[in-house]
Amino acid sequence: MPELPEVEVVRRGLAAALTGRRISRVDVLHPRPVRRHPDGPEGFAAALTGRTFAEPRRRGKYLWLPLTDGDAVLAHLGMSGQFRLDPPGAPDVRNTRIRFAFADAGREVRFVDQRMFGGLSLAPGGAELPAEIAHIGRDPFDPEFDLDESVRRIRRRRTGIKRALLDQTLVSGIGNIYADEALWRARLHYDRPAERLSAARVRELLGHAHDVMAGALAQGGTSFDELYVDVNGSSGRMTLDVYGREGRPCKRCGTPIVRERFMNRSSHFCPVCQRKR
DNA sequence: ACGACCTCCTGACAGC
DNA sequence: TGCTGTCAGGAGGTCG
C-alpha cells in the first residue's frame, strides 16, 4: 500500500503514459471509487470525455491529474489503489474499477482498487492545487517544504511523535511503514511526547523520513505483496529495517524487534535502541 | 482548535 | 471444506 515513494513512482509512470492524451471514453465499473463526485458514475464519465490530460502532480500521498482546461482529476490510492496501462480490449484484472480510453487508441489507463479506500474525483479549477487537498501539508520533497515550520507545528502537538508524523497536515507523505523506519533511524520510541522532543531531534527525524523515502523511491518503492505496483505491474524492491520484522534481530543491536498495536495498526520498534524514556 | 475514536471496503490467512 | 476472527501501508467525519 502506497506512501509517498510509491505514489511518486505511479505519478512518473502516468506522466509518461497519459500527458497530452485526449480521453475518448470513461467506464466506471463500481460507484464507490467516484463517491466524491456529486453527479455519480455517469456524471463523472460524461464530465471527462473529450478532455485532455496535462502532466500529473503530487502532494504527499495525493495525486492529481490536471486537465489542459484548468480542472483536474484528484486521485488517492488509499490502501490498495493502482493505476495500470492495458491495451484496449484487454480483459480487466480483478478489482478493476475505472477505465480511461483515449482518442489515439493507445493503451488504456485503468484504476484498480481492491479495498476502495481510495478513489477519483473531478476537482474544478484544481490543476494547480485541488481545493480538496489545500489542508494537506507540503511533503519533504516539495521545493517549498518549510522544515522549520513543520518542526514547530509537530512540537506544538500534545500527542505521541508517531501520531504527529502520520498527521498529513503537519508533513505529508509519511505513512505507517516509513514512520516506523524513520523512528528506528532516529532511535525514538513511537509514543514519545512530541512537545518534549527538542527541535533538533524533530528536525533530525524529518531528515530520516526524507532519506528513507528517497531511498525507497530510488528502489522503485517498497512492497510486501501485490497491493502496490507501478503502472507496469512491477513491485518495488526496497528492503526495510524494522517494519514487518517482528521477532527478528534489530540490525543495530540484535535485540528482537517488537510489534505493538497502535492507532488500529502496528508499530514496530527495537525495545533497546528506541526506549520510551 | 485539537485529539481520540470510528468507519468506509475486500481479501488473504490462521485456527478451529 | 468451511466457518470465524484477525489483519492490512489511509484519511475523513464526529464527538468531547
Image (tube, coloured by chain):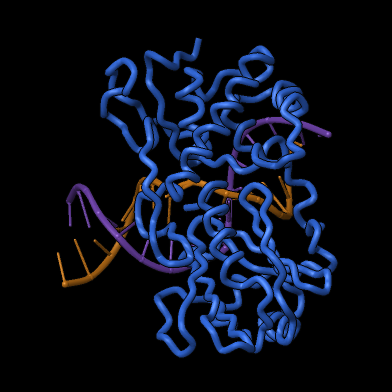
Chain colours: A blue, B purple, C orange
Q: Residue at x 53, y 37 (%)?
A: A263
Q: Is residue A224 above or below residue A35?
A: above
User: How many badges with numbers are in the image?
Assistant: 0
Q: Nearer the viewer, residue A259 or A225?
A: A225
Residue at horizontal 60 percent and vertical 77 percent from the top: A31
Question: For this view, does A116 lie left or right of residue A260?
Answer: right
Q: Please provide percent x and percent y for residue A49.
A: 71, 86
In-image side of A237 versus A58 (left or right): left
Query: Is residue A196 something one can see in this rendering?
Result: no
**Looking at the image, is A21 positioned above or below residue A160?**
below
Compared to residue A175, the image places residue B7 above or below, namely: below
**Residue A32, picture quadrant:** bottom right
Q: What is the x, y in percent for residue C10?
A: 57, 49
Q: Is residue A43 visible?
A: yes
Q: Residue at image x 43%, y 37%? A: A266
Quadrant of residue A7 within the rendered picture: bottom right
In the figure, residue A158 lies in which quadrant?
top right
Residue A268 x %, y % = 41, 30
**Picture coordinates of residue A107 (x, y %)?**
51, 81
Can you name the residue that lies furthest to the top here?
A277
What residue lies at 44% left-to-right and 32% top-to-bottom? A267
Asked whether, in this view, residue A96 is left or right of residue A270, the answer is right
Classify residue A32 as left or right of residue A149. Answer: left
